[in-house]
Amino acid sequence: MITRLRQVIPRSRAGMTLVELLIAITIFGVVVTTAVAFMAQQNTAFQGAIHRLVALRNLRYAVSALSQDLETLGTNVPGAQPTLYYGDDDVVVFSADYATNIENDPFAVFYDPDAPSGQVTAPIGAFSIPNASVSFPDTTYESTPGVRSPAEVIIFYFRADSSTSRSDDYVLFRQVNNNAPEVVARNLLKVGTEPFFRYERVGDDGSGATTLFQVPDSLIPLHHSAWIHSSAADTGRSALPDSVRAVRVTLGATNGRSGAQEQTVQISRLVALPNAGFGVIATCGSAPILGVGLTATPITLAGGEPAVRLTWSPAVDETGGEGDVVRYVIWRRTPGATDWGDPYLAIPAGAASYTYDDAAVESGTAYEYGLAAQDCTPTLSSLTASSVVAVP
């Protein structure tokens, strides 16, 4: 009997069954759906953080601009010029020697050689205060007779913004003297019923201690109606702004978006006024004595350009007397002008003699120069003028 053996070859099981495939697809779908949902959630959170950052940056910029300028209130302001002139819930008006375009001017807060002349001294002529029914000033403030005060008038005010979809947002403006206002920030909001500005004044708390009190709403707006500070009329309500030592700024901001993308933030900050109430303190004694003349002579420079050479000797109070002269201030005007206007330049004291060649002159034009010494208070001496000099 013959037995035949048959070889059994195992069958290959490459691939997946239909049930296994369905299970795999289901698991993959769950993983993808979860991942997409997670990424969408993270993207939404990221976008929300970006929108909030935009709103916060806008708010911080507005508050920083307000704080930086308000803290200069009263800097190098002559005694007769009010420091805080007007204060309401949406506008504040004050004086400060904020900027100068004169090199070697040590008394202004900032030096900007490109600052327009109309923005570095006190204004001339009255102009209307934004958001108010009053004007400022009715007089020309001077640091010495014939020389305009170096302290300009700075105004911050809020106006409703009609260019957005919201009906309750504002624009913050900054204005110097009667010049055109500039936009500081947009998309700003009030915080509940709080005003943008509140004012805190110094006073006695009843126990003999000095503290700050919030100026009640019944006394707002603050208005220094007496044009001359410390004059006989500067009493009562008119003198109230002189006691203000801090301004509380409260405002909110949006990121400028609408709907679900809109983000809002808010802040309240108390801005101290370190120079309020001090004015110009005469720590160097009396006003400096100049006591020397100013000579102006037409010359021709080495390159053939016309110029005017100014020469003078040290002031009486530089080499003797109180010895407190720190610089010399020079003005230039055309003959017949009634006002010296802004200073032309400043020269530090400390030299044995002084010479300056003014090359910024035009041929065929006549000029007159003025000179004053300034001490550390800073107070100017009386001004001496040169003779009229004609440039060939």
Image: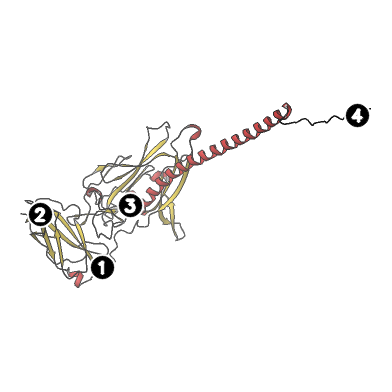
Kindly identify which residue carries mark 2: 367
* Dot 4 or dot 1, earlier in sequence: 4
**How far apart are the alpha carbons under marks 4 and 3?**
131 Å
Q: Amino acid at mark 2?
A: Tyr
Q: Nearer the viewer, mark 3 or mark 1?
A: 1
Name the one closer to the observer, 278 or 353: 353
| Residue farthest along the right direction in this orientation | 1
| Residue farthest along the left direction in this orientation | 392
Give x and y (percent) for residue 31.
65, 35
Kindly identify which residue carries mark 4: 3
Give x and y (percent) for residue 291.
14, 67
Q: Which of the labelled discs sits on residue 239, or is there none?
A: 3
Q: Say which element carries label 4.
A: loop
Residue at (44, 57) in percent of width and height? 211
Instruction: Mark 2: give few (<14), some (14-19) or many (20+) Cα within 10 Å.
Output: some
* Dot 4 or dot 3, earlier in sequence: 4
Instruction: Mark 4: give few (<14), some (14-19) or many (20+) Cα within 10 Å.
Output: few
Q: Is residue 250 visible in the rendered structure shown here?
A: no
Q: Disc 4, disc 1: CB below 8 Å? A: no
Q: Nearer the viewer, mark 3 or mark 2?
A: 2
Kindly identify which residue carries mark 1: 285
Q: Say which element carries label 1.
A: loop
* Dot 3 or dot 1, earlier in sequence: 3
Give left or right: position of 267 versus 35.
left
Q: Amino acid at mark 3?
A: Ala
**How far apart are the alpha carbons under marks 4 and 1?**
138 Å
Instruction: Mark 1: give few (<14), some (14-19) or many (20+) Cα within 10 Å.
Output: few
**As drawn, 49 above or below 382:** above
Q: Nearer the viewer, mark 4 or mark 3?
A: 4
**How far apart are the alpha carbons under marks 4 and 2?**
138 Å
Q: Quadrant of the C terminus?
A: bottom left
